[in-house]
Amino acid sequence: MAHLLIAEDDELLRDALAAQLVQGGYSVACVANGAEARQMLESTRFDGVILDLGLPLIDGMDVLRWIRQRLLALPVLILTARDGVDDRVQGLNAGADDYLTKPFMMAELQARLQAMLRRSRLPAFGGSLEISAAGANKLRVDAVLPRAWLGEDALELTQREWALLSLLVANAGQVVSREDVLTAWQAEAAESGVGSNALEVYVHRLRRKLGESSGLNIRNVRGLGYMLESVVE
Ligand code: CA
């Protein structure tokens, strides 16, 4: 049974969501603000999150970014206000898997959830994420330890390299912006002032560490950021 976290400050909506999802065969936990959401996510394993973006204490968008830095493969469906087009775009850019605009039909939510959980690359969230290019060594990133392996070999990574690799792996095939990386680094190391030039250096080092056996390449997408892709012969 999939275990879901509902983070929604509107009590009526939260209760209705919980009741519907329990009836739909899910087990659910509910929180009413962003701080509780983070606490809950730190202490409990979930298969998916329904996240309202407008949350008290810690904003839903910040919760989303936090999730994407730590729980790489956790599927997140965001709830946004009807006129919140910017929110929706920002949310998807920040790593939400899907969104629903309020008000929505419960049947639609159920359908989206099912699709999202099916798509999620891990059957049940286990704290690690694997990708493998055809005919190459499997790359595995563990968000809990945090460590990474290429085939059987542990990769020697600095904290920043690890954070960068995690972001790239979690968003493989999509562009990760420079801002996303810098935000992740700040959260990891509680430091700021890292410029784009430094980022280039880290990307270069990470490319070298991944090497040819990974079958993966970190592509520089001009003006946008970086993307992890498989090397096509
Ligand atoms: Ca709200």
Image: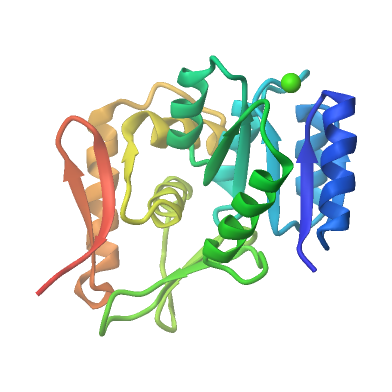
* Residue 82 higher or lower than 65, as above or below: above
The residue depicted at 27 percent of the width and 49 percent of the height is 227
Q: Residue 211 or 104: which is nearer the viewer?
A: 104
Residue 100 horizontal/vertical position (percent)? 59, 35
Quarter location, residue 170: bottom left
Residue 42 seen from this side? yes
Residue 28 horizontal/vertical position (percent)? 85, 52
State the quadrant of the C terminus.
bottom left
* Residue 27 higher or lower than 184, as above or below: below
Quarter location, residue 215: bottom left
Q: Residue 7 or 208: which is nearer the viewer?
A: 7
* Residue 1 higher or lower than 117, as above or below: below
Ligand 1, seen in the image, is in the quarter at top right
The residue depicted at 14 percent of the width and 70 percent of the height is 232
Residue 90 horizontal/vertical position (percent)? 46, 27
Residue 29 seen from this side? no
**Left or right position of 91 against 26:** left
Q: How is the image coloured?
A: rainbow
Q: Residue 190 or 34: which is nearer the viewer?
A: 34
**Left or right position of 191 against 125:** left
Residue 208 horizontal/vertical position (percent)? 22, 61
The residue depicted at 41 percent of the width and 57 percent of the height is 169
Q: Residue furthest top?
A: 83
Q: Residue furthest left?
A: 233
State the quadrant of the N terminus.
bottom right
Numbered marks: total? 0
